[in-house]
Amino acid sequence: MFFARHQRELLLQREHLIARSAQMRLSLAQDSQPLQRPAAVFDQVQGALVWLMGHPGWSMSGLALLFLLRPRRSRRGRPVGLRQGVGYVSRWAGRVWWGWQLWQRAQRWLREEPGHRPRVSDHF
């Protein structure tokens, strides 16, 4: 008898907690509605950054294009021609490419197990 009464009390308490939990979920949904639009924007920005990190060629191409089309002035105040900007961009593109390759090699090297890493002297 004692166990049956205790079990009924536990079931009533469980039902009360389930109802309270449902009420709290509804309240949270209503209270968080003003945050839905900023959260959606944040999700889109985060998705774009993840995509850019996975496709570095597109980012580098965009930066190279900005350097190439950037309006610059010569000493006399006239805009510098497109041909003169190509050398500047190609120099920087080469430096960026070299840096990116170095970064990729360093990432691969750090991912390898310490006992299996090649010696630095093996590369030179």
Image: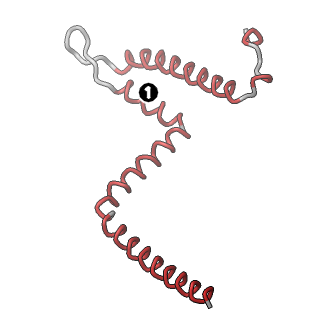
* In-front residue for pair 23/111: 23
Q: Which residue is mark 1?
A: 64
* In-front residue for pair 42/7: 7
Q: Residues within 10 Å of mark 1 (few under 14, many from 20)?
A: some
Outermost front residue: 2
Quadrant in the rendering for residue 5: bottom right
Quadrant where the C terminus is found in the figure: top right
The residue located at (31%, 65%) in the rendering is: 31
Callout 1: helix, strand or loop?
helix
* In-front residue for pair 123/96: 123
Chosen colour scheme: secondary structure
The residue located at (22%, 15%) in the rendering is: 78
Q: Would residue 93 appear left or right of 84 to someone viewing this image?
A: right
Q: Please state the horizontal and vertical placement of residue 123, each as a whole percent of the image.
A: 74, 12
Q: Amino acid at mark 1?
A: Ala
Q: Please state the horizontal and vertical placement of residue 40, each as a whole percent of the image.
A: 38, 56
Q: Please state the horizontal and vertical placement of residue 68, each as a whole percent of the image.
A: 38, 25
